[in-house]
Image (tube, helix red, strand yellow):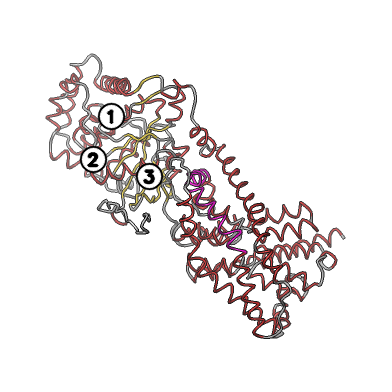
Amino acid sequence: MADTNNRVTVTAVPLRTPLLRGEKRLRIALVGLPGAGKTTLFDAVSSTSPHTGRLTGTHRAYSECKVQIGLDEASVVDLPSLQTLHQLPGDDASTLKYLLWGDDRPAVSVHEASAPPAPFAPPDLIIQVVDATGLQSHLELTLELTKLGRPVVLALNHMDEALKKGLYINIKALETLLGVPVVPTVALMGQGIAQLFSIAVNSAREETCPLPQPPSRHISESLQPLDAAMNRPDLHAAFRLPHPLLLMQFAAADSFIEDELGQHFPQLLPHFQALRQEAGLRLPRPLAEEMHADRHHRAATLVEAAMRMGSPASRQGRHGWRYWLDELFLHPQWGLIGSLAVFAAVLFVVFEISGWIDSMTTARLTEAFADWQPHSMAGVVARAVLDGLIGLVGIVVPYMVPLVMLLVTLEEAGLMQRIAFVVDRGFHQIGLHGGVAVPFLLGLGCNVPAISGAARATRGRERVIASVLITFVPCSARSAIILAIAGKYLGAGGVFGIFALTLVVIAVMGRLLSRGDREPGPGQVQEIPAYALPTWRVLLAETWARTSDILTIVTPLLVGGSVVLALLTHNGADVIINTLLMPVTVWWLGLPLVLGVPLLFGVLRKELSLLMIYQALATQEIGNLLDPAQIVTLLLFLTFYIPCVSTFAVMLKTIGRRDALFSVFLSVAVALLVAGVVRMALGVVQIVVG
């Protein structure tokens, strides 16, 4: 940030090493009881195409995907729900086996014919998703997970519901008692997720394991002889289990442990069974029941120490404005309404504020020089340069600057991140994340800042998909043509039909592009920042940073293209152009021959196409010369055809020449295909009706 002396100060951010990416990528397993919100948490961070499969020999499905966490990466695995680690049936036992061994069997099970439980390595860290409204039963599982010998982080989910019920949980106390990080979350609304995964990465990097959670003293004392007998290196090497877990599993009469002991250590099993029976005789009830009751008691003790009835929110009896804004923008249903409200604000900026600015700037400049129609070569070039500069003003002043300022305002206020979270799952259907939602909205005003915004929110393959799809979003210029012509000659139904068709085309193209051979990008941990009021200093600085370099690319292409097309027209090449374009305009689209040049000039600005259409047809009442089918065909071609040279210029900067040229080819192909197919369909309808 610049200081008062215009010097630049740089803040150093410490880099945590080693970076966990590539071959060192962290592996995180999500576990929890049914209803804890484990899958909701996975969905909130997953990639657009997560891998799904079944644990070997079971009907239990898992999901796995790569997730970007700052500079680190993780493979996050959403495992089937798990109630306990003791006395597990076959399907649940496979989940435990994955947590212990992953794709590498221990020595005692190499004789099994089936494959390892999952085709990837065991987790480096476990995130247990806990329902804060039913803490005790979940903490019983926590006490068991601490014996796995891996770092554990608790995601204390459904915190909003806990507060509504008047439950206050002392996070620090729970962390101290368990010796594991505890992070409050509301996975359904994206709250706390970024902090959760950041803490998880740090725990894995530091290899911080939970504090030992031994059973109560009377159970520990009764198990001492068995503990000493089973503390053998050959047993540990054969089972590859932490000793406390091996002891507890055998003490609870786990069938897998007992069967493998009988096969591989038959001389030891009778002695171990005798010691287990002796330990049970010292207790008031059978050993397995006493261990279960002990876990239940210890979990209840933890809840009693960490939870209080009567949360601050319930005592106040009201919620602050931040709570209600989150209810509007982060709630699964209400959030869509909040997003639509932002969509309405964008439309207001586009058609009211930007339209008014356009009428006060570009329209007046155009009117001021309307009478200057030079005939000399130098005059034609000068006029073309002026038209290019006026076109530049028409893009930058009314549309680019206000919409970029709106984008920055949404980001700085924290609204954009909330919108991105709510619509994330919907955008997954077209291979994108929710971070592109606002750029898509900005595309309704101008595709140039929209593509620039998408470049900041995406990378790699997703950046290309987002940029290509945004070119099909009808900007204000194309919307103005649709409203002006379709509104006059086709009615409200025609206008709605054209806009609806653009949504269908975007959805279909997104599905096709996302099915490419390239690997989908990783999932994203979307941070939900605190609400903040943007300052004018930041607003202006960010707006300038996002528009200044675009202008250096757009300006020469816009002016140069204007000069080239003007020279072609001045030298009588328009007749040649119309003739060359006859297979497109006349044969395929069924339009008059003279519309070839107006359609070609649309690469500068779409409004210019409309003006030249009027000039080419020598009338503004085009309904007298074109039938409804031709009007629909013309509008569809203009809607999907290359947006403008300015859009192409910014695509050169953000996605590179190859993908920018691919986008141009695709837009022309889609425009020809959609317009031609609709024209033929309307022709068939006319024949049938006639």
Please give the range of residues in magenta. 394-422
Q: Secondary structure at mark 1?
A: helix
Q: Determine which quarter of the picture holds residue 82.
A: top left
The residue under label 1 is which amino acid type? Leu
Q: Is residue 110 above or below residue 643?
A: above
Dot 3 alpha-carbon crowd within 10 angstroms: few under 14, some 14 to 19, many 20 or more: many
Task: Assign the magenta stretch its main secondary structure.
Answer: helix
* N-terminal-most mark, 2 or 3: 3
Would residue 226 be found to the left or right of residue 640 on screen?
left
Residue 659 in the image: x percent, y percent? 50, 68
In magenta stretch: residue 395: yes
Residue 113 in the image: x percent, y percent? 31, 46
Label 1: which residue?
143
Label 3: which residue?
77
Which residue in the rendered view is the most extreme toward the right? 690
Give the CA distance from mark 1 to mark 2: 16 Å
Of 57 and 663, nearer the camera is 663
Closest to the camera, between mark 1 and mark 2, is 2
Residue 205 in the image: x percent, y percent? 25, 46
